[in-house]
Structures are given as structure tokens and as C-alpha cells.
Image (tube, rainbow, N blue to C red):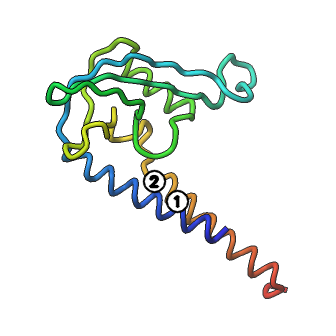
Amino acid sequence: MCLGGTYLMFLGLKIKKKIAAARLWPTARAKITRLEATGMGPKVIGTDDYRNYMLRVSYDYEVKDQQYTNNRPAFGSEIQVKAEVDEFCSLYKDGQETKIYYNPEDPKDSVLMIDRPGGKQSREFYFGAFLIFFGLIIGIAGGGYLS
């Protein structure tokens, strides 16, 4: 657990660094060519809504007369939580023209939105910290130190 938590915390810090860099990236005009939200898992009791969704998005853009396609809506883990998917789908529509942020050193590296819907940027980091904490508690309790 501690090793996995350390990896997730490292990944979270790496994502935060990428987000900070992307705030300085130039923008380009893009066209959303695919936007699809498919329900996954159990539905919310008493509704036709799912708890989680699989969001699939693709967009085409041009930088210096070169065409690119990407499918990254935001940095970090997939956007799956219903509230985040709903917010994303309220901002973007299939066929819509919008702007994307691209890495000037590698224009195929781009992102549709820098800030995730719902504003939870460090999900990986905090989950990693939780895993380390939980792993230490289990290690201490399992070692008989609490008895």
C-alpha cells in the first residue's frame, strides 16, 4: 500500500506540474468531433441516471498548418463522476468549435480544459496519501503494536 500510495502521490505531483505549465501554453481553435457519455455500473435508485459515466471526447485542431487530433479532456484520471460529466457536457457539445491548450514544444500534447470539472485537481495525490496512511495503520495494527 505504501509503495502504491507513493507512486500515486508522485503521479499527482506530476499532474499538478503539468497543469501549472499548461496555464502558460498557447491556445488554438479546435472542433469537437466526438462527445459521448455512456453510463456505467449501477443506476442511482429511483432514477434513470448512472453513478458513473465513461466520457469519450475527441477534437481536431491545427498548429502551424499541421493537423492534430487528441482525446484528452483534462489532466489526470478519467472524468467519470456524474456531476463532473454533466458539467463537462454543459460546456462542450459534439461539433462545437472551442479552444484547446497545446504544448508549444510538442503540439500533439494538448488538453481541452486545464481545470477539471468540479475543481478536484489532485485526486491521485490525496488518494496516494490515504493509501500510505492506511497502509501504515494496518502495518502497525497487524504487527501487534496496538494491542
How many other residues sit within 10 Å of disc 1, few (<14), some (14-19) or many (≥20)? some
- The quadrant in which residue 142 appears is bottom right
Residue at horizontal 45 percent and vertical 46 percent from the top: 76
Residue at horizontal 75 percent and vertical 25 percent from the top: 45
Distance between the Cα atoms at labels 2 and 1? 6 Å
Q: Is residue 57 above or below residue 5?
A: above
Q: Position of residue 140 (x, y in %)?
A: 74, 81
Q: Outermost residue, top direction?
A: 95
How many other residues sit within 10 Å of disc 2, few (<14), some (14-19) or many (≥20)? many
Q: Outermost residue, front direction?
A: 66
The C terminus lies in quadrant:
bottom right
What amino acid is at disc 1? Tyr
Is residue 143 or residue 11 the one in the foreground?
A: 11
Residue at horizontal 57 percent and vertical 58 percent from the top: 127
Residue 40 marker: none
Task: Say which element carries label 1.
Answer: helix
Q: Is residue 16 above or below residue 74?
A: below
Query: Does the residue at mark 2 contact the one at mark 1 (Cβ under 8 Å)?
Result: yes
Q: Position of residue 55 (x, y in %)?
A: 52, 27
Relative side of 31 to 1, left or right:
left
The N terminus lies in quadrant:
bottom right
Q: Position of residue 77 (x, y in %)?
A: 51, 44
Residue at horizontal 33 percent and vertical 32 percent from the top: 112
Task: Say which element carries label 2.
Answer: loop
Is residue 138 or residue 67 the one in the foreground?
A: 67
Residue for badge 1: 126
Residue for badge 2: 122
Q: Position of residue 101 (x, y in %)?
A: 25, 36
- The quadrant in which residue 82 appears is top right
